[in-house]
Image (cartoon, rainbow, N blue to C red):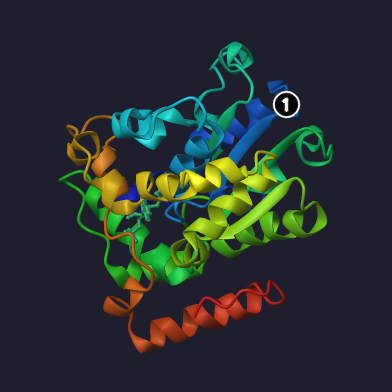
Amino acid sequence: PRSKGWWLDELFQYQGFWMSSFPIRGSMLINDHFKPRPTDIIVATSPKCGTTWLRALVFSIINRASFDFNDHPLRKLNPQELVLLFEGHIHKDGSTSFLDELPSPRLLSTHIPYSLFPKRMTDDTSACRFVYICRDPKDVLVSKWHFSNKLRPKEVPPLSLEEAFDLFCKGVSHYGPFWDHVLGYWKASVESPKKVLFLTYEDVKKEPLGCVRKVAEFLGVPFSQEEENRKTVEEIVKLCSFESLSNLDVNKSVAKRSERPVSNSDFFRKGEVGDWVNHLSPEMVEKMNQITEQKLQGIGYNFH
Ligand code: A3P
């Protein structure tokens, strides 16, 4: 269906997921051409789950020895510029020369569902690692709805929350159904805990220091006692916090609405857990919780 706002892109159902032509093509090219390395790190998310935050955290964890926190690339660049979108950097002619030339460890970001990656990446335990972040779907919907209406061209009428809710619950949103996206990475994290680390936005908010240590251990670069004494973990959490990133000039500036009308500031709104209480009716909450309970049974994480 052709819908509105950020939901305006034409979405196709591809291997069980609703996606626009750009990531479908990207995923096909990855399948055909990408040569994984054991050191590759892929930050994976469903949109609006905390991609920007996780990109910043992983970038600063793996590069912590290279930069001074006061003069850090994250003080000058948006995390999107530091951690490239995987599906967006496979060349149009199918060659991966750009990615092939990147030094190891390569750090990339993706929204592609786990099941769409080639077996040479997912079955080979030494091929690459994924760090996934999931979020309460009620907050994801609210965040997506705001984002969608913000990016909407002037001539397109706003999408009502009711319409967005309906589409989201039916699974019709970028990389939806949301719950299937989560399940793919969740199952992989249970089956291959050394390959896929599963985090939640809510946990990172609640226990940022513990989560940063967990990511570093998963990536094989745990914090030394000396780093702990120097409060490196605290520095990383502070540097990547919503307050710090959203207040940078580079992230405040609003780009002209052009062909790809996303500006850095669009990735920062409230950065809170539970903003859905300000938007969703009790009926919506009940329906969404029911779907989540049904679809994510056994996942061991209660969002509400
Ligand atoms: P809200 O719209 O609820 O505020 P993504 O990066 O996947 O597009 O997700 C965007 C969401 O993450 C937005 O949520 C945004 O405000 C929030 N976010 C961005 N940077 C963050 C940070 N450093 N800490 C916490 N939340 C952040």
Residue nearer the viewer, 14 or 145: 145
Residue 158 horizontal/vertical position (percent):
22, 58
Residue nearer the viewer, 256 or 162: 256
- Quadrant for ligand 1? bottom left
Label 1 packing within 10 angstroms: few (<14), some (14-19), many (20+):
some
Left or right? Give the position of 137 relative to 177: left
Tell me if residue 111 can be seen.
no
Tell me if residue 287 can be seen.
yes
Q: Amino acid at mark 1?
A: Pro
Residue 181 horizontal/vertical position (percent):
61, 56
Residue 10 placement: quadrant: top left
Q: Residue at x 33, y 84 (%)?
A: 281
Q: Residue at x 83, y 40 (%)?
A: 125
Left or right? Give the position of 195 relative to 123: left
Residue 164 placement: quadrant: bottom left
Residue 57 horizontal/vertical position (percent):
48, 44
Q: Residue at x 28, y 75 (%)?
A: 279
